[in-house]
Amino acid sequence: MEKLIRQMLVELGENPEREGLVKTPERVARAWGDITAGYDQDPGEMVRSALFEAEGKEMIVINDIDFFSVCEHHMLPFFGKAHVAYIPGEKIVGLSKIARVVEAYARRLQVQERMTAQIATCLMENLQPLGVAVVLKAQHLCMMMRGIQKQSSHAVTSEMLGCFKNDPKTRGEFLTLIRQKPWE
């Protein structure tokens, strides 16, 4: 990868030997290792490794999970917040594992629509709840820095499975809960 970055600098008209760029190929290669670390993770195993007996059947919501990803079309960042809910079947999962699932899918070349579906499907298949809801709200640098250059735009995607898809009241409760400010 370092060789490719060095060549990219040349193609951009830069001198990869100048003081500020000498170590750039190495730094960029390390950064991309971090940015794409999700390829080396199994989100389903994350869920399966932290299952516990459910004692209740009420909605569990984790709001405002920060994420950073990279658009596969332009390889520019997009970032935002994930809101995830589920209604337990027989098991619950450790709350941090839900954030880890979001992170594992975000740390890949992505499109927001697929990432939303992947998070929901992973939880549905590995946790086997009565339903899962995922909403992502993100800003995309490919829309902000280039092309249309709309600085304040956000993309919102959702995936509703099980009772969240089939029951408007359940879906409505989730959507209300994710709009509330913390500690209200």
Image (cartoon, rainbow, N blue to C red):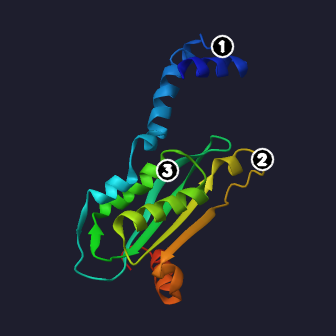
Local secondary structure at mark 1: loop
For label 1, the residue is 15
The quadrant where residue 64 appears: bottom left
Label 2 neighbour load within 10 Å: few <14, some 14-19, many 20+: few
Q: Residue at x 27, y 72 (%)?
A: 91
Between 164 and 27, the residue placed more toward the observer is: 164
Q: Residue at x 28, y 76 (%)?
A: 90
Residue 10: % across, % down: 68, 16
Q: Going by the image, does 17 lie left or right of 87?
A: right
* For residue 127, above or below residue 10: below
For label 2, the residue is 147
Residue 128: % across, % down: 36, 70
Tell which tag, 3 or 2, sits nearer the viewer: 3
Q: Quadrant of the C terminus?
A: bottom left
The residues bearing labels 1 and 2 have C-alpha atoms spaced at a distance of 27 Å
The quadrant where residue 93 appears: bottom left
Whichever of callouts 3 and 1 sits on the residue coming sooner in the sequence is: 1
Q: Going by the image, does 85 lie left or right of 167?
A: left
Do the CB atoms of the residues marked 3 and 1 lie less than 8 Å apart?
no
The residues bearing labels 3 and 1 have C-alpha atoms spaced at a distance of 33 Å
* For residue 47, above or below residue 2: below
Q: Amino acid at mark 3?
A: Ala
Residue 74: % across, % down: 68, 42
Residue 31: % across, % down: 48, 32
Q: Residue at x 58, y 57 (%)?
A: 114
Q: Amino acid at mark 2?
A: Gly
* For residue 8, above or below residue 15: below
Q: Residue at x 46, y 85 (%)?
A: 170
Between 88 and 142, the residue placed more toward the observer is: 88
